[in-house]
Amino acid sequence: GDSVTQMEGPVTLSEEACLTINCTYTATGYPSLFWYVQYPGEGLQLLLKATKADDKGSNKGFEATYRKETTSFHLEKGSVQVSDSAVYFCALKETSGSRLTFGEGTQLTVNP
Amino acid sequence: GAVVSQHPSWVICKSGTSVKIECRSLDFQATTMFWYRQFPKQSLMLMATSNEGSKATYEQGVEKDKFLINHASLTLSTLTVTSAHPEDSSFYICSASFRGGGSYNEQFFGPGTRLTVL
């Protein structure tokens, strides 16, 4: 079955540091890939997405590129802010249907 | 657009009582709604998928008599935790999607409901 594996956390960075959160996936077809962010006590918000190989999703300074050859979708940001502190989830969705498969989540804390 | 609300945002109840959580799509008609459960510092676990007007499809290991899901209209789904026990304490999150909601049927998530059973 489909699965998503994320880099283990928690991750603690200083403000303006570079961020990479690794995400790899296993899927039978050609899934769409997503990064969601969850702030404390809240639901999930879609951060970015990519629907086919070599697509790059970007939003709020975050980027991730759909790499079919390495089955990866790593999340990157060049300079993090305190307000980026949250839990980040990588997820995939097969072409048919709406079902999402989530990774374990990575807690990011950014210190001033 | 594409806002999903949940009510209540948190609830505390006594063991043995039933609790109903509402999930509403505020500005679109949701053909499909999903219910997730999230334990502290863990990922989301899909509990069930419901389509308007039909019975919910439960994931393996989820007791359908324990977690009653009703999707009575295109804007409302409810999750009722029956005879709640402390082990049912968790964060419950719903999401909704609509046909034609992007080429990938994006799910829009509610803010979650924190259930604590004493």
Image (cartoon, helix red, strand yellow):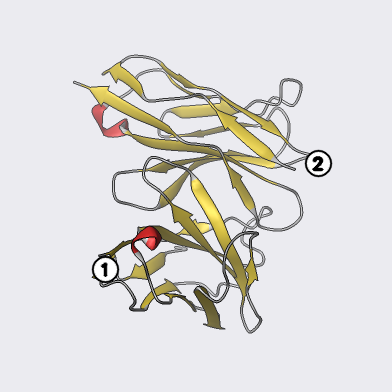
* Chain of the residue displaying label 1: B
Q: Is residue B111 visible?
A: no
Q: Which mark is residue B75?
A: none
Badge 1, how many Cα within 10 Å: few under 14, some, many 20+?
some
> Mark 1 sits on what residue?
B11
Q: Quadrant of the C terminus of chain B?
A: bottom left
| Residue depicted at x 76% and y 21% | A69
Quarter occupied by the N terminus of chain B: bottom left
- State the count of labels: 2
Q: Position of residue B74 (x, y in %)?
A: 55, 80
| Residue A46 in picture, x, y percent from top left | 48, 46
Residue type pointed to by label 1: Val
Question: Who is closer to the viewer here, B64 or B36?
Answer: B64
Residue B17 image-quadrant placement: bottom left
| B69 w.r.t. A79: above or below | below
Q: Is residue A68 left or right of residue A47?
A: right
Q: Among all residues in the image, which is located at the extreme left?
A: A112
> Residue B58: image x %, image y %?
63, 66
Instruction: Provide residue B43's location: percent of width, then percent of height.
Output: 48, 43
| Helix, strand or loop for disc 2 | loop
The numbered disc on residue A29 is 2
Q: Is residue B102 above or below residue A35?
A: below
* A45 lies left or right of B61: left
> Who's the residue at 61% across and 66% down the image?
B49
Q: Quadrant of residue A97?
A: bottom right
User: Relative to the observer, which residue lies in front, A25 or B79?
Assistant: B79
Disc nearest the viewer among 2 and 1: 1
